[in-house]
Amino acid sequence: EYLFSLGVTGWQDAMIGAFPGNPDNFDVYLRAAREGSLVARVVGALWWDRERGLEQLPELEERRRTGQVGRFNATSVKIMQDGVAENFTAGMLEPYLDGCGCPTANSGLSFVEPALLTEAVCALDRSGFQVHFHALGDRAVREALDALATARTTNGVNDNRHHMAHLQVVHPDDIGRFSSLDVAANIQALWAAHEPQMDELTIPFLGPERAALQYPFGDLRRAGARLVAGSDWSVSSPNPLWGIHVAVNRTVPPGESDTPGAPFYPEQALSLAEAFTAYTAGSAWVNHLDDVTGTIEEGKYADLVVLDRDPFAGPSQEIADARVRRTYIDGRLVFAATD
């Protein structure tokens, strides 16, 4: 109901599996799908256990076999390749800096050793799984792209629609590889702004040159990458309009800060149309639903959201002020604002 109130009609759940701190919600989705109470369309990304190897593939295949019920389809596998920049665990090509601006001995983590990653990605791709990577640092991004390149050479071209989420730092040499390998760039646009976490915990420890490589949405788009967009909720807000606001303005949404401040590397901004497309047609494509939803066309499902204004008619600084009035799934009203 909360997601419907924000105009979200479907999603990919990136954490289907039990591991420390995370209960497995696989059976919850299946029960809801069987009962018909799962109204949204959901793709489940089965968690790759980074403490294990290829012996887990048969288990994932069995989960996929039993995990396609109603509007729930467990057809993706999530590989968390690195951590996050704020605690220096995102995998970087060069070491982090210390508080004085000097290089340290720490370049972050690769949770899956690159040789095993390549072997695993080739096996998952051959089995028909979509691979959903968590990759924030430029080394993690490169390791994932290298694994996908090998899978493409080994298995040939297919329609598995692999994607890489977060993409905080991408080396310029790797920008063009997304298009050439047909790997979707899964962006969390809400993070691409100056705020305390960025300005105090990230930029000083990356240094100015590397900090300028963060969230390169514009460069990816210009290089022909397919952009899809999500939120990483509940880590941050799932409100697509807030994410679109930041993608276009590269500043925090109104109300999130008393002073939005300077745009965050504005050369990487998207147009409003590009941002909306990533959150609609893009997310439908990555979930293999683009033939039935994601755009308003005759013959597609009536998954529709009505806003209180035309965001294209006003100034870009007011995008985040828009509110959802109604949300429909398959023509069925699932949310109506009461205020």
Image (cartoon, helix red, strand yellow):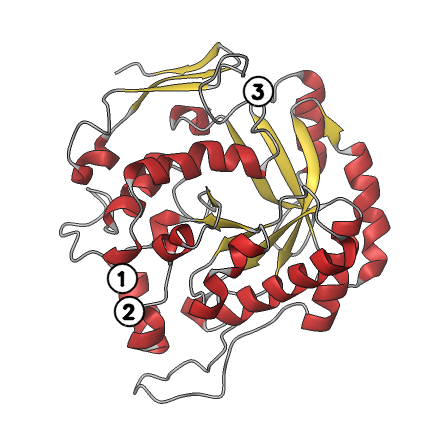
The answer to whether the residues at label 3 and label 2 have Cβ atoms under 8 Å apart is: no
Q: Which numbered dot is residue 122? A: none
Dot 2 alpha-carbon crowd within 10 angstroms: few under 14, some 14 to 19, many 20 or more: few
Residue 317 vertical placement versus 5 (above, below): below
| First-in-chain label (3 vs 1) | 3
Circle 3 is placed at which residue position? Answer: 39
Query: What is the C-alpha distance between the residues marked 3 and 1?
Result: 37 Å
Circle 2 is placed at which residue position? Answer: 200
The answer to whether the residues at label 2 and label 1 have Cβ atoms under 8 Å apart is: yes
Residue 49 seen anywhere in this rendered image of the structure:
no
Q: Would you say 185 lies left or right of 262 here?
A: right
Circle 1 is placed at which residue position? Answer: 196
x, y (%) of residue 169? 43, 65
Identity of the residue drawn at 79% across and 50% down: 126
Q: Would you say 74 lies left or right of 21 here?
A: right
Q: Quadrant of residue 134?
A: bottom right
Q: Quadrant of residue 109?
A: bottom right
